[in-house]
Amino acid sequence: LDIGIYPIFLAYLILGFPEKIMATSKIFKTGVDIQTSMILEYSNAQAILYSGLTSNSEMKAEISGSEGTVFLTPRWHEAQEYSVEKNDKLEKVQLPTRGKGYEYEIEEVHQCLRNGMLESDLWSLKHTYDLIRIMDDIRKQTGVVFPFEQ
């Protein structure tokens, strides 16, 4: 529920709620999942995801389709650029963020609060609920159980 949300979020953002979820984890003696691999199955695609505390992953993302590939640079969730490869040509797109990128979320929350909104027009409560359902399914498959659930 910590770093695993990032790849799950990206897959959900692009492909929506999966038809099938497959997951496996390596669990530390304390019960913490230290490495998790996931495949989210869709009617026309698969998302192959990974999160881990014990590896030196570059934290980059690759989104491949029939017409090309998008590469999100390392630490993709706070990246300053991305690349698009199409017809054997690679184009880099600069996309500078302020700080680590979390400022945009903070600004949206503040705007919603100022406007008396209970949810953002950019990210609904249903989206959040869907992410929780995906993560709960993964936890169930991998055997991650919190003390209050026992």
Image: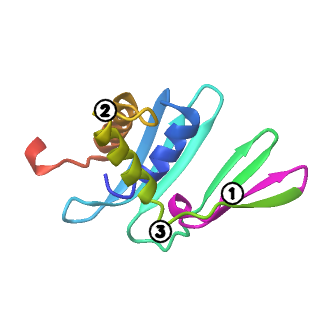
Q: Name the residue under label 1.
A: 71
Is 44 inside the magenta-drawn segment? no
Identify the residue shown where x is 58% and y is 67%: 74
Identify the residue shown where x is 45% and y is 71%: 55
What label sits on residue 99 in the rendered view?
3
Of the numbered discs 1 and 3, the one sitting upstream in the chain is 1
Q: Name the residue under label 2.
A: 117
Task: Pinpoint residue 96: horizontal percent, then vertical percent.
Answer: 61, 64
The range drawn in magenta is: 71-88
In-front residue for pair 131/104: 104
At label 1, which amino acid type do we have?
Phe
Task: Pinpoint residue 128: horizontal percent, then vertical percent.
Answer: 35, 36
Of the numbered discs 2 and 3, the one sitting upstream in the chain is 3
At label 3, which amino acid type do we have?
Gly
Q: How crowded is mark 3: few (under 14 residues within 10 Å), some or many (20 or more)?
A: few
Identify the residue shown where x is 46% and y is 36%: 122
- Check disc 2 and report its element: helix, strand or loop: loop
Eye-nearest disc, 2 or 1: 2
- Check disc 3 and report its element: helix, strand or loop: loop
Q: Distance between the residues labelled 1 and 3?
A: 21 Å
Location of the C terminus (image quadrant): top left
